[in-house]
Image (cartoon, grey):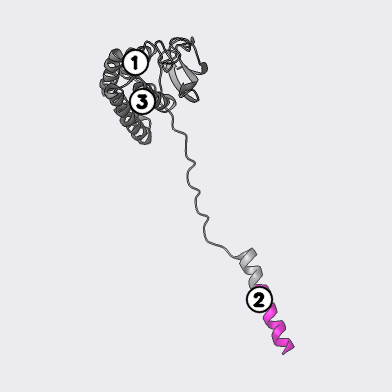
């Protein structure tokens, strides 16, 4: 019996050596190719011209909110919406299909907020949708389309809504001209026109 048990142990030990040290699983499987980061191509002159028109319209909308000019804000949000359709997004297919799909999703949301600004019944409602539109515009949209225009400043007001809710916007100038607490504010009047800070700058 002892001889039999010793024989079994010997067989098991031999199998273990074969399994862990000798067994060949066949030819090594090739490693999947390393995923390369997406590189963005230079935009065409037409693409950049259309994108710059869109940004100019956004900035005019921002200025209208600084002035508490609802009629002009309605006009510029409508123009912004039209200009969204003028950009030749198909060029982005040369970078990546995923980038094009992502941009198309953001454009849909940008359009929603632009239309909502035009249809808002109050200056406060316009400013709330402008805040959402600004957050979609940067960093998402402008980074994905590889913005190559003039320098823009990302600015922030810590008390844009209800005195304790912050909001961002973009500006050509580093000087703060607050579109959320601009002129003729119902509480602060023009006293908070320069409330805010520069968080970042966007340069090509």
Q: Which numbered marker is on residue 12?
A: 2
Q: Dot 3 lies on which element?
A: helix
Q: Dot 2 lies on which element?
A: helix
Write down the residue under mark 3. Answer: 129
In the rendered image, the vertical position of residue 33 relative to residue 44, given as above or below: below
145 relative to 33 in the view: left or right = left
Q: Quadrant of the N terminus?
A: bottom right
Residue 103 percent coordinates (x, y): 35, 30
Residue in the foreground of this view, choosing between 32 and 158: 158
Residue 154 percent coordinates (x, y): 47, 19
Q: Which numbered marker is on residue 61?
A: 1
Q: Label 1: few (<14), some or many (≥20) within 10 Å?
A: many
Residue 200 sits inside the magenta stretch: no
**Alpha carbon separation for disc pair 2 and 3:** 73 Å
**Alpha carbon separation for disc pair 2 and 1:** 80 Å
Query: Residue at coordinates 47% horizontally, 40% vertically from top-left?
Result: 35
Dominant SS of magenta comes to helix
Residues tagged 2 and 1 counted as in contact (Cβ below 8 A): no
| Mark 1 or mark 3, earlier in chain | 1
* Quarter of the figure with residue 78: top left
**Which residue is most to the bottom?**
1
| Mark 2 or mark 3, earlier in chain | 2
Q: Dot 1 lies on which element?
A: helix
Label total for image? 3
**Which residue is most to the right?**
2
**Range of residues picked out in magenta:** 1-14
Query: Residue at coordinates 31% horizontally, 31% vertically from top-left?
Result: 108
């Amino acid at each position: 019996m002892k001889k039999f048990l010793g024989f079994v142990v010997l067989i098991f030990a031999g199998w273990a050596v074969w399994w862990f040290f000798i067994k060949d699983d066949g030819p090594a499987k090739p490693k999947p190719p390393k995923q390369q980061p997406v590189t963005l191509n230079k935009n065409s002159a037409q693409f950049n011209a259309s994108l710059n028109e869109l940004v100019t319209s956004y900035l005019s909308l921002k200025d209208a909110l600084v002035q508490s000019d609802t009629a002009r804000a309605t006009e510029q949000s409508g123009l912004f919406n039209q200009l969204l359709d003028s950009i030749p997004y198909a060029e982005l297919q040369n970078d990546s299909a995923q980038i094009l799909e992502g941009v198309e999703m953001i454009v849909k949301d940008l359009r929603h907020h632009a239309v909502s600004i035009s249809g808002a019944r109050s200056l406060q409602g316009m400013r709330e949708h402008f805040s959402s539109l600004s957050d979609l515009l940067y960093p998402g949209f402008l980074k994905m389309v590889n913005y190559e225009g003039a320098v823009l400043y990302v600015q922030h007001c810590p008390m844009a809504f209800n005195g304790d809710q912050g909001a961002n916007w973009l500006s050509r100038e580093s000087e703060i001209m607050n579109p959320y607490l601009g002129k003729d504010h119902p509480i602060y009047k023009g006293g908070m026109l320069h409330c805010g800070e520069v968080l970042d700058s966007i340069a090509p």
